[in-house]
Amino acid sequence: MQKHIEQFLEYIKGEQGGSPLTLKAYTEDLRDFHGFSDKNIKDIDNHDIRNFLAFLHHKKLKKTTIARKLATVRSFFRYLYREGFLTANPARLVATPKVPKNLPRFLSVDEVFALVEKPQGDTFTAARDKAILELLYSSGLRVAELTSLDIGDLDMKESLVRVKGKGMKERIVPVGSKAMDAIRNYLPERISLKKKSQSLFLNIRGGRLTQRSVRRIVVHYSRMVNLNSDPGPHTLRHTFATHLLHEGADLRSIQELLGHSSLSTTQKYTHVDIGHLMEVYDKAHPMAKEDEEE
């Protein structure tokens, strides 16, 4: 099985453009599956995969983790079937465990404004951190997308940024005026480091800023403004989508901005409270208008 796993990982890396984090997760998941089953790859059936899920359940792993590992196993066997290594796909008959849909928290307008205004001063880190917070909220970027940005991805004149999303799919995203101002203030500080790196966001040593560092930055300023929880970069992405939706943007447009491949994914990342739905209904539904006139 190990030979097939290595071939699959090369396929994900080379043809699918899988990120290092994706490859790490796939490697871990398939290592677990290989450790569970020592059968020849052609002898594995759907019962073996179900037994693997039961094994993970007994280990008391979260349902989201089990679902992710099953998704990896499914992708693996789908690849083997498509490439002709197998005559049937045993994972096709295995149902996905039900996973609770826990939506991440989003910030209010006042909360997010307080957060992005918190980095102050003329230092490199203050200018960089403000630009990061503004851009995350302005354009709804994933943290991996933000850290992979290069100087050449910015179109300062048109206020646009070229983003490399999942599967290395590129999209063009508008950048708000506040975020552009923050980036313009940051760039001279970045140049002052006198480093040749093409990365947009640098650490104080001149290297590309990591995803972990960005998460620390967001949490740091969240605590400074006394938010009840410690929102991460994804909270700002979710906040971006939620605020757009509340202001009347349609889901299709939000889907394009977020870089989602399907609308169902966008629906999971956007949250509309019942009060907002009732407000939209009262303003837009013909029968609601007739009721008001009576």
Image (cartoon, rainbow, N blue to C red):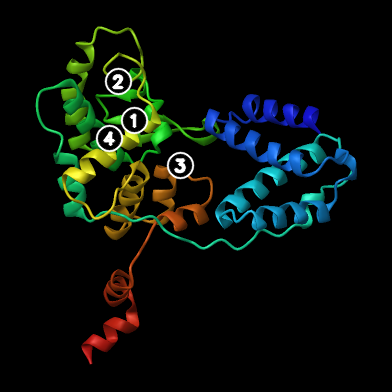
Residue 213 has which mark?
A: 1
For label 2, the SS is loop
Above or below: residue 282 compared with residue 149: below
Q: Report x, y in % for residue 133.
A: 25, 37
Q: Are marks 4 and 1 in contact (CB under 8 Å)?
A: yes
Q: Is residue 143 left or right of residue 3?
A: left
**Separation of residues labelled 3 and 1 (CA atoms):** 23 Å
Instruction: Evaluate if marks 4 and 3 touch, with contact meaning CB atoms under 8 Å apart.
Output: no
As measured in the structure, the alpha-carbon distance from the residue carrying label 4 to the one carrying label 2 is: 11 Å
Please state which amino acid type lies under the numbered disc 2: Asn
Report the residue at 82% width, 54% height from top.
Answer: 46
Residue 59 horizontal side relative to residue 21, left or right: right
Q: Give the structural element (helix, strand or loop) at label 4.
A: helix
Label 3 is placed on what type of residue?
A: Gly
Of the pair 135 and 71, the residue shown nearer to us: 71
Q: Is residue 184 visible?
A: no
Of the pair 134 and 55, the residue shown nearer to us: 55
Q: Residue at x 34, y 84 (%)?
A: 287
Helix, strand or loop at label 1? It is helix
Res 217 label: 4
